[in-house]
Image (cartoon, grey):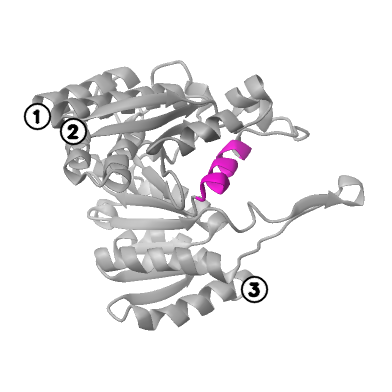
Amino acid sequence: MNFKIAKLPGDGIGPEVVSQAVKAVDAVCRRFGHTAEYTFGYVGACAIDRYGDAYPEETHNICMDSDAVLFGAVGDPKYDNDPTAKVRPEQGLLAIRKKLGLYANLRPVETFRSLIDRSPLRTELVDGADFMCIRELTGGMYFGKKGREDGGNTAYDTCIYSRPEVERILKLAFEYAMRRRKHLTVVDKANVLESSRLWRQIAQEMEPQYPEVTVDYLFVDNAAMQLIRCPKVFDVIVTENTFGDILTDEASCITGSMGLLASASVGEHTSLFEPIHGSYPQAAGKNIANPLATILSAAMMFEYAFGLMEEGKAIREAVSASIDAGIVTEDLAAPSQKACSTSEVGDWVAEYIDKAK
């Protein structure tokens, strides 16, 4: 097969980690007889600097013409520290989700046995944790009406959800629960928020359509606590945009590093695959960033965009082998262990895939 892949490295460490994922993709293509054609696109701060737009039309056309999008990260301190900036890098990510209709973000969380001691949580709490977070991506407060009043001294952000938006993300969540352990947790704040009460109402209406799925409901503050107290009780978690953004970053501590969590954003048009970490500008250009989340995002790309499970498995096996062999960056290296560079990890993973023929 021939794959057309939009390569959007973005800002900060994005170009470095995406380069390592490309090495893994190319190795898989060599092993399984595929070819990959990459088209570069600007997004985020680098796009603002070049076009004055965080997601220019040229980049959007590249994405629409591709089979999948391999994405790095967006963000730059010069915009973070300027509250008056009219265009921000993060607007590029919001725009790509909206224009491609990517309404669902899938973030699997699972532990690696050899890294259990890196988690800040006790081994017995995290060993065997394996769940999927499904976050709604194109609605809620991030996309609702926002502004300032009273001479700029009063600000507001509006959280709005419609029934069709909620139904489609819940349908996806129920279907994923059916493929897994048939347990769905709906996270909301229905005791306070009207939008959350709509979520809960629709979820309860849909429950009879999936009689094999056990459904429970948690307020978001309780869910945040339970993720730390007993992460192994979860199977599939579904929630709205803002809650999902926060909870999935919290869940990264279960694995021991945010540099291990991949994600897929799926919906109406070309699916996008990215690590959940940000642009980490302090590490940009130093060749020290952990590329494994981005490499695992490439595995999800083969599985979710192309339907090629063996190819995705080959990448996952290589990543697990690199961790077991101690070929990891400084965020995962033990005190007595030599840390590898970003590119060394990428080279090792690609070579493992090649040799596993």
The stretch of residues the image draws in magenta is 91-101
Q: For label 1, count other residues whose C-alpha is less than 10 Å away and answer few (under 14), some (14-19) or many (20+).
A: few
The numbered dot on residue 318 is 2
| Residue at which label 1 appears | 356
Q: CA distance from mark 3 to mark 1?
A: 53 Å
**What is the count of numbered marks?**
3
Q: For label 2, count other residues whose C-alpha is less than 10 Å away and answer few (under 14), some (14-19) or many (20+).
A: many
Rendering coords of residue 315 (x, y %):
21, 35
Q: Is residue 98 found inside the magenta-colored segment of the image?
A: yes
Q: Residue at x 48, y 38 (%)?
A: 64
Q: Judge by depth and name the residue closer to the eye, 135 or 311.
A: 311
Q: Is residue 223 found inside the magenta-colored segment of the image?
A: no
Q: CA distance from mark 3 to mark 2?
A: 46 Å
Q: Earlier in the sequence, mark 1 or mark 2?
A: 2
Secondary structure of residue under mark 3: helix
Q: Is the C terminus in the top left, top right, bottom left or bottom right quadrant?
A: top left
Q: Is residue 341 visible?
A: no
Left or right side of 35 for 289: right
Q: Is residue 28 visible?
A: yes
Q: Nearer the viewer, mark 1 or mark 2?
A: 1
Q: For label 3, count other residues whose C-alpha is less than 10 Å away and answer few (under 14), some (14-19) or many (20+).
A: some
Rendering coords of residue 231 (x, y %):
34, 59
Discs 3, 2 touching: Cβ within 8 Å: no
- Overall secondary structure of the magenta section: helix
Q: Amino acid at mark 2?
A: Ala
Q: Amino acid at mark 1?
A: Ala
Q: Quarter of the image holding residue 192?
A: bottom right
Q: Quarter of the image holding residue 328?
A: top left
| Residue at which label 3 appears | 194
